[in-house]
Image (cartoon, helix red, strand yellow):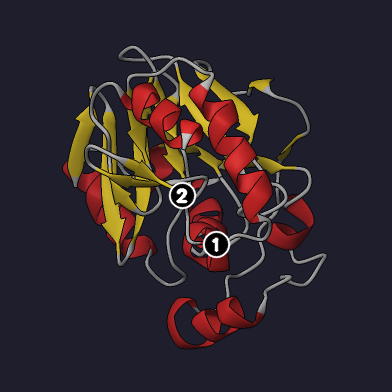
Amino acid sequence: MLQIAEGVFEIAVGFVHVHLVLTDDGVVLVDTGLPGKSRTIERALGEARKTIGDVRTILLTHWHADHVGGAAALRRRSGARTVAHAIDAPVITGAVPMPLPAVQRTLARLVTGKPEPVMVDESLSADGPVSVPGFSAFHTPGHTAGHVSYLLDRADGILFAGDAATGGGTKVRHMSRTLNADPTTARSSVAKLAALSFDVAVFGHGKAVAGGAVERFRDLAAR
């Protein structure tokens, strides 16, 4: 477990990151990793001197299995509320089948597995503050139609970019076109994030950018 900022930790769950945020109201998780890996998150909570029961909210960036795979088990064990965009919510709950293109169907079969459906308690439909104090949500479609990035008002701003982009420690990169539902819209979402204010950015995949992160997004958006 890597500490990104005060009370913000990055957990590697296989090839994807889950982020754990300590707040006055309990623990917030941003995404939940692969199916069947909730014990990894439980061990990380123990390192932070917390338990599953301390998890109050799960903020989901999008419906892909490597991001929502542990949500149902964690919600069941903790009683946490789940938050996602209204566009992706029907897929997360299982009301609508996962709209996977061929490449992602292969990945799902061989690597990620199929996530258990989970109820969405708060469906987002507009940019702005969410029910967790200090967090705001920004609709950043392209990777999926309902992808959301979250901004935490802490340490000059911490962006949880999900798969809107990938990190490289000192650089920010576009997600592979083959993994984006709409690559053109995904590029517009990077430009949208570049217009915000934040110092740190963390990602579902790739190393966090620990300082001057918004400038890296602006560099990417200008290409």
Name which quarter of the figure residue 10 lies in: top left
Asked if labels 1 and 2 touch by Cβ distance under 8 angstroms, the answer is yes
* Residue 84, image x, y percentages: 66, 43
Residue 195 to residue 71: above or below: above
Task: Out of 115 and 16, give the one closest to the viewer.
Answer: 16
Task: Out of 90 and 131, give the one closest to the viewer.
Answer: 90
Residue type at mark 2 is His
* Residue 184, image x, y percentages: 66, 49
Identify the residue at image location x=67%, y=65%.
Answer: 117
Q: Which disc is residue 177 wearing?
A: 1
* Residue 38, image x, y percentages: 38, 62
Structural distance between the alpha carbons of marks 2 and 1: 8 Å
Q: Secondary structure at mark 2?
A: loop
> Is 172 on the left-hand or right-hand side of 58?
left
On the question of residue 73 being in view, the answer is: yes
Identify the residue at image location x=30%, y=14%.
Answer: 155
What is the crowding at mark 2: few (fewer than 14 residues within 10 Å), some, or many (at least 20)?
some
Identify the residue at image location x=47%, y=70%.
Answer: 35
Most extreme residue toward the front is 223
Instruction: Name the residue that disc number 2 marks.
Output: 174
Residue 50 to residue 109: above or below: above
Residue type at mark 1 is Arg
* Residue 101, image x, y percentages: 67, 76
> Is 95 on the left-hand or right-hand side of 204?
right
Identify the residue at image location x=48%, y=49%.
Answer: 31
Q: How many marks?
A: 2
What is the crowding at mark 1: few (fewer than 14 residues within 10 Å), some, or many (at least 20)?
few
Q: Which disc is residue 210 wearing?
A: none
Most extreme residue toward the right is 95
Q: Secondary structure at mark 1?
A: helix
